């Protein structure tokens, strides 16, 4: 897509040239808060998690923000506007991690805005609105098998059933919260009032290779993809691998393999649509047995719901056809279905303008992964900026990486966005 280049493509004057380097150094400092020495693992309300919260609080306060922790453990820094108490533009991301994680997933979207606020604070610059930077306490769902805890608390959509979920040591979430000084009964109070939120923007590492392959430092997210998941069980007829002729077999694994290849073909060649068979089991399979059973998963995602639904329908029809021809019985169980969350066009337009003003071509792309913005969409219009992920786009892995130069560009885009921000809807 052609970019509208500004006459003055330089970074906002407000941003120091070493902001990117500072963001990278902060990511390193934050990564030291880990449960497992030698790797980064920081799950909900562990000592490492509290340590990271304390570090974020310190940076936020030094940047001129008033900081509070809400009952879900979110760290919320508020940079007042020209009029105290004004509605806020919300930004942020999560500071929990997966096990043996990369250091930028989530964390980047918390520290990058703090670095920008620090610059504005140094210059005594305020905006006609407040800016709130949120470190969401939990997004990944590692400790209690429930995701988006922090952002759901703020959105008022926290499912209190998950308070009884237990961690590996058998403690419930409710007990762990109480021990940390958080009373789960107060969770409804964490909800932000829709009328006081102007919008939510999230900066996040892409966690994929698209920007890297196209040589672009940042991209504007169009939507967080919806997803449909199935578990498929096929039943054919087991038989002796030596004695049953090929044309007389009812091989469940080969039916599954053909279905997998059909999914790959159907979801291929269409940007934003992806289909994956991530688990494939041949129960009690043996070298010398024709497989009588196969069990596998299907995960289909797209930024546009109609495209996902069309693909799912074609895949279901394909399964029927393949199984009928192969005389294999099929049982389908839908395990998950979530609609896509579109990024608000007016916020996307302001991201795009900020990107173009840095002299960077504007690339729009959907997010195949879930993010806190998904939950916040319940109380505000949301939009996201992706930052190029190095090393082939690998994420949820210690080799996840990005450059200080891209951190600088992303910070410049973020600062420019805020400095030009206007609520137009
Ligand atoms: Zn993340």
Image (spheres, rainbow, N blue to C red):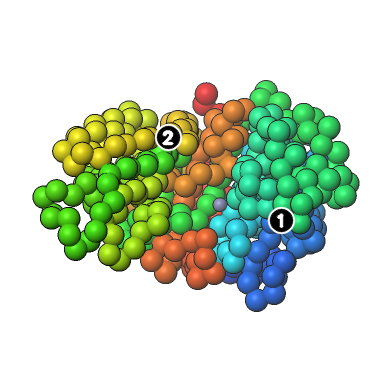
In the rendered image, residue 85, in percent from the top left (x then y), is placed at: 78, 31
Query: Considering depth in this image, is 415 or 234 the residue closer to the camera?
Result: 234
98 on left or right of 161: left
Depth order, front residue of 224/308: 308
- Mark 1, secondary structure of its residue: loop
Residue at image point 28% right, 44% down: 236
Q: Which residue is mark 2?
A: 333
- Picture coordinates of residue 270, whole percent (x, y): 25, 43
Q: In terms of sequence position, does the residue under pointer 2 or pointer 1 come before the other?
A: 1
The x, y position of residue 43, in whole percent, is: 69, 56
Mark 2 closeness class: few <14, some 14–19, many ≥20 residues within 10 Å: few
Residue holding disc 1: 168
Residue 31 visible in this rendered orientation of the protein? yes
Count of picture labels: 2
Which mark identifies residue 201?
A: none
Check contact, mark 2 vs mark 1: CB within 8 A: no
Q: Quadrant of residue 287?
A: bottom left
Name the quarter where the N terminus is drawn. Answer: top left
Q: Quadrant of residue 31?
A: bottom right
Q: Residue furthest bottom?
A: 38
Point out residue 291 in the picture as x, y percentages from the top left corner: 29, 54
Q: Residue at x 83, y 32 (%)?
A: 185
Q: Residue at x 83, y 45 (%)?
A: 175
């Amino acid at each position: 897509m052609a970019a509208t280049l500004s006459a003055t493509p330089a970074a906002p004057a407000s941003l120091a040239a070493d902001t990117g380097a500072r963001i990278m150094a902060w990511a390193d400092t934050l990564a030291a808060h880990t449960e497992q020495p030698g790797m980064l693992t920081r799950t909900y309300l562990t000592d490492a998690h509290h340590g990271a919260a304390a570090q974020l609080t310190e940076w936020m306060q030094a940047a001129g923000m008033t900081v509070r922790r809400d009952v879900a453990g979110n760290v919320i820094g508020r940079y007042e506007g020209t009029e105290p108490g004004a509605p806020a533009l919300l930004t942020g991301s999560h500071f929990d991690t997966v096990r043996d994680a990369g250091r930028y997933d989530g964390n980047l979207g918390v520290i990058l805005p703090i670095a920008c606020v620090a610059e504005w604070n140094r210059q005594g610059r305020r905006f006609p609105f407040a800016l709130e930077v949120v470190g969401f306490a939990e997004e990944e769902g590692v400790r209690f098998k429930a995701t988006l805890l922090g952002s759901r608390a703020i959105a008022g959509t926290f499912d209190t059933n998950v308070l009884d979920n237990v961690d590996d040591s058998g403690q419930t979430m409710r007990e762990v919260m109480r021990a940390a000084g958080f009373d789960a009964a107060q969770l409804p109070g964490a909800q932000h009032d829709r009328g006081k939120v102007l919008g939510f923007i999230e900066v996040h590492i892409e966690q994929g290779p698209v920007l890297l392959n196209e040589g672009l430092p940042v991209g504007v997210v169009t939507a967080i993809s919806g997803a449909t998941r199935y578990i498929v069980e096929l039943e054919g007829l087991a038989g002796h691998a030596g004695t049953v002729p090929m044309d007389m077999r009812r091989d469940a694994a080969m039916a599954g393999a053909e279905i997998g290849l059909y999914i790959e073909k159907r979801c291929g060649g269409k940007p934003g649509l992806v289909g994956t068979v991530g688990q494939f089991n041949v129960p009690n399979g043996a070298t010398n047995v024709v497989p009588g059973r196969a069990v596998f998963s299907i995960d289909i995602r797209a930024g546009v719901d109609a495209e996902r639904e069309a693909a799912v329908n074609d895949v279901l029809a394909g399964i029927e056809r393949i199984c009928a021809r192969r005389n294999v019985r099929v049982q389908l169980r839908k395990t998950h279905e979530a609609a896509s969350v579109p990024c608000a066009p007016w916020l996307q337009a302001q991201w795009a303008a900020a990107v173009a003003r840095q002299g960077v071509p504007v690339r729009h792309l959907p997010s195949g992964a879930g993010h806190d913005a998904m939950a916040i969409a319940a109380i505000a219009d949301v939009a996201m900026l992706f930052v190029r992920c190095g090393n082939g786009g690998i994420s949820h892995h210690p080799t996840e990486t990005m450059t200080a130069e891209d951190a600088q560009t992303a910070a410049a885009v973020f600062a420019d966005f805020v400095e030009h921000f206007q609520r137009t809807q």
